Image (spheres, rainbow, N blue to C red):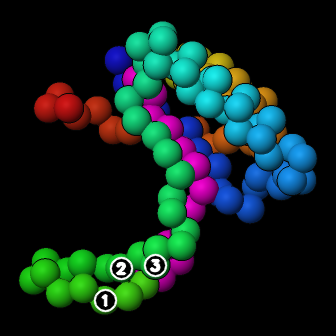
């Protein structure tokens, strides 16, 4: 089984105030489906109200991120037997969220 990251940037989800509660319910339903299927690892959304920091090897902390780094929006990690299964779950999430999803495969780590 491989782990897959399914995500979207904040700006991809363009919704009206009326659409937001419907999309929220639909997306939570798909995540519940993944939990019920036993494939959900974890997920959430990046809190964009909290500024990111860069922590160095000596423990010092500086504001900001690596140049060009851009992590925002929502994501989930699912553990699935095939990439085709991951594509199907990404499709379900895209329907629920009303926006395309990025699909990435984690490198295999026998310790996780």
User: In the figure, 70 relative to 32: above or below?
Assistant: below
**Alpha carbons under labels 3 and 2: distance apart:** 7 Å
**Which is nearer the eye, 81 or 37?**
37
- What span is in magenta? 65-80
> Does residue 2 appear left or right of residue 44 in this picture?
left
Residue holding disc 2: 53
Q: CA distance from mark 2 to mark 1?
A: 6 Å
Which residue is outermost to the top?
37
**Residue placed under numbered mark 3 in the picture:** 51
CB of mark 2 within 8 Å of CB of mark 1?
Answer: yes
Residue 89, percent from left and from top = 61, 23
Give the position of the N terminus as an image quadrant.
top left
Q: Is residue 76 magenta?
A: yes
Question: Residue 53 at x, y = what percent?
Answer: 35, 79
Q: Residue at x 46, y 40 (%)?
A: 43
Q: Is residue 34 left or right of residue 10?
A: left
Quadrant placement of the C terminus? top left
Q: Earlier in the sequence, mark 2 or mark 1?
A: 2
Are the residues at dot 3 and dot 2 in contact (C-beta closer than 8 Å)? Answer: yes
Foreground disc of the pair 1, 3: 3
Rendering quarter of residue 94: top right
Q: Which residue is mark 1?
A: 62
Residue lying at 73% horizontally and 29% vertically, measured from the top left: 26
| The one of 30 and 108 positioned closer to us in this rendering | 30
Q: Is residue 31 magenta?
A: no
**Placement of 62 over or under 94, stated as above or below:** below
């Amino acid at each position: 089984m491989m782990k897959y990251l399914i995500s979207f940037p904040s700006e991809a989800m363009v919704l009206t105030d009326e659409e937001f509660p419907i999309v929220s319910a639909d997306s939570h339903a798909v995540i519940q489906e993944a939990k019920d299927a036993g494939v959900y690892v974890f997920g959430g959304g990046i809190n964009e109200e909290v500024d990111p920091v860069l922590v160095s090897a000596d423990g010092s902390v500086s504001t900001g991120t690596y140049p060009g780094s851009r992590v925002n929006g929502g994501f989930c990690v699912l553990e699935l037997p095939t990439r085709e299964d991951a594509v199907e779950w990404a499709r379900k999430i895209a329907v629920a969220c009303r926006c395309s999803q990025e699909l990435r495969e984690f490198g295999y780590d026998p310790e996780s």
